[in-house]
Image: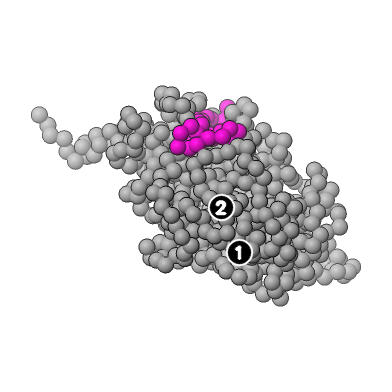
Amino acid sequence: MRVPGPVSVWYLLSLIVSIYAQDLDPIVNMCIRFDHQSILKNGTLYIDGGRQTFIDVDDSGDQVGKITEGYNNYLIAVDMNNSWDWKANISETALNKTANPNTGTYPPILSRGALYHGGDDDDNIYLWGGTTSEWNNSFPGYQGPSVQQYSLWSYNLVTQMWNQFDVTLDSPNRPSSGSHAEATDQGLTFYMNGVLDNGSELETEGLIPNSKQYLQGMIVIDTNNQTAKNLSTNAVVGTTPRSRGQMQYISGIGANGILVQIGGNQQSINNCTDSWVNGDLVPMNEIDIFDVSSYYNTSVPAGTWYKQTTSGPTPDPRVDFCAVVASAPDGSSQNIYVYGGRGNNNYFIDDIWVLSLPSFTWTQIYQGLSPRYSHTCHVVGNRTMITVGGAANANYSAAPCDWESKGVGVFDMSNATWGSVYNASAGGYAVPNLVVKTIGGSASGGATMTQPSGGFSQIGLEQLFRAPMKASSDPVSNSTTSSPTPWTSANSYPTISASSTTLGSHPSHFMAPIAGGVAGGIALLASVIAGFFYRKRLRHFIVGGEWPSEELDGENIVRQEIMDTETIWELPGSEKPIELETPMDGWSSTDRSSTGRSVAAHSIADRSSSIGWKSKPLPMVPLYHQRIGSK
């Protein structure tokens, strides 16, 4: 009898592992889930992709046995129309990601991308950006990087069909880890900066593992017609773009609302080392504001950015946190909740801070002992923050499974307390007592601190907050409405020159626009010249050793759905990476950890501490979970 050699033994072991992994359910066998993307729409929370570890469960439903590293290959739907207790009766459904019926192409399995809501009258949700993780490429359903040409996907909630669109003319890359937000009332999505790595697309597979190429620019996708546009972010980040921060959209300020950019890390476009080790964390007292109405202003191609410094206590800098926003009942304050994340030197965070606008002050309302990062969160109803997934430390395989065993958590934003019960009929939002102590007023609003303690950094920003204007149903028409005087950086306008300036936090770095016929004539001449050279150059042509910024022409171009005859353009291997293209008075009495131990007010003392794969259908599982569809 022949004794199996090392190769055949390894093959048998791999086969056993593969067969075992095919039986792992993304809900029943979930250990931890992180680096996913999620969105809330029409009373359902959708969770897409991400990395996940799996664990066996016994007949009693208890987690036992070994942990397997893998991916969430499904679109998970969580019912938010009805109340539930995740310990007892939560309803979760795993939907197979079926192929685009027009092409037979399966939607990608990605991490660190964005899942967008789409317009209020749109039946679709949208998947954009993300990267393919290679931490277990033997896991069933693993997909390697795909071409970047069709980086925008949609999923129709009515037909349950996936579709894909080509926006590469204006956004030729698939970035990941960028901060993103969405103005659903306008059908606009925003994705700022981000990175490319060897899992981003076929054209980047040659990058050194763990290297990150930072990208400049902010991609704006109009989901009404699937068009994309690139806006320069030189006014904010210069040549040190950001990743792993958070961006929030707030309506009702200015003509079309604002974007608020918070935290993350920043790294030079000339430095491709792993940003987690060598990147600089963005101070949490530096807040960047984008006036969404400037997107519609064709005379300001890069849009209008402002920078404001906060006052008072400030959170530790961090990446991989989540954020949501809630407005005081009378609209006198906008409160952005920042939860969790991690800092340098394996500093994992379990706290919640609230950034209040227009006072630009931070207030800490919770401190716990159960860190969480690489999670997502959403406001459901009026006062509830639902958290999704997250990891507790860097040792994914050896770490205990998420004690929130269904992958969701519930936080009351008014009382600043955690729980397992989601109340679909919860009352209205009230400003937390600790926040009231900072900004004045009461739980119902009436904030008395209506500007930063040192004043606004720019007149334009002050005007934006002084004269709030609710966006109309026709945002384009608002572009001609009277609005605050924009202040733009000297680098706000795209250029093909080799020079650029990094913006500091000092107001003098922002230049007021020059008025008058001379400036108008210069701008017109520059536009004509720029348009001429833009049309003449190749899309990936390099000028002066830098990548040009791809901008849409004056009219939006509707991106067609994928066609078999489309040419796939690859990045030349020798070219340089490019800019992104076209009622509590004190601390919470209850820690979020599974032990339920009390936590008094304290500070943190110790900070050291393959495409086309077809899955086999799995059987129906108890009550709270079902699996729909089959590839």
State whether residue 244 appears in this view. no
The residue pinned by badge 2 equals: 416
Q: Amino acid at mark 1?
A: Trp
Above or below for 58 versus 66: above
State the SS at label 1.
Answer: strand
Q: Quadrant of the N terminus?
A: top left
The residue pinned by badge 1 equals: 362
Above or below for 358 versus 553: below
Q: Is residue 503 left or right of residue 186?
A: left
Q: Nearer the viewer, mark 1 or mark 2?
A: 2
Above or below for 63 versus 252: above
Mark 1 or 2 closer to N-term?
Answer: 1
In the image, which residues are magenta?
74-101
Q: Residue furthest left?
A: 1
Please tell me which residue is depicted at 43% across the width and 54% down the height of the picture: 598
- Alpha carbon separation for disc pair 1 and 2: 15 Å
Q: x and y percent of residue 211 in the render?
A: 45, 58
Residue 82 within the segment the image draws in magenta: yes
Residue 333 within the segment the image draws in magenta: no
State whether residue 429 appears in this view. yes
State the SS at label 2.
Answer: loop
Q: Is residue 21 left or right of residue 224?
A: left
Q: Amino acid at mark 2?
A: Ala
Q: x and y percent of residue 25 in the render?
A: 41, 33
Above or below for 70 versus 458: above
Q: x and y percent of residue 191 in the render?
A: 62, 52
Please tell me which residue is depicted at 25% across the width and 37% down the height of the picture: 13
**Depth order, front residue of 572/432:** 432
**Depth order, front residue of 301/544:** 301
**Depth order, front residue of 452/280:** 452
Q: x and y percent of residue 183 in the render?
A: 70, 47
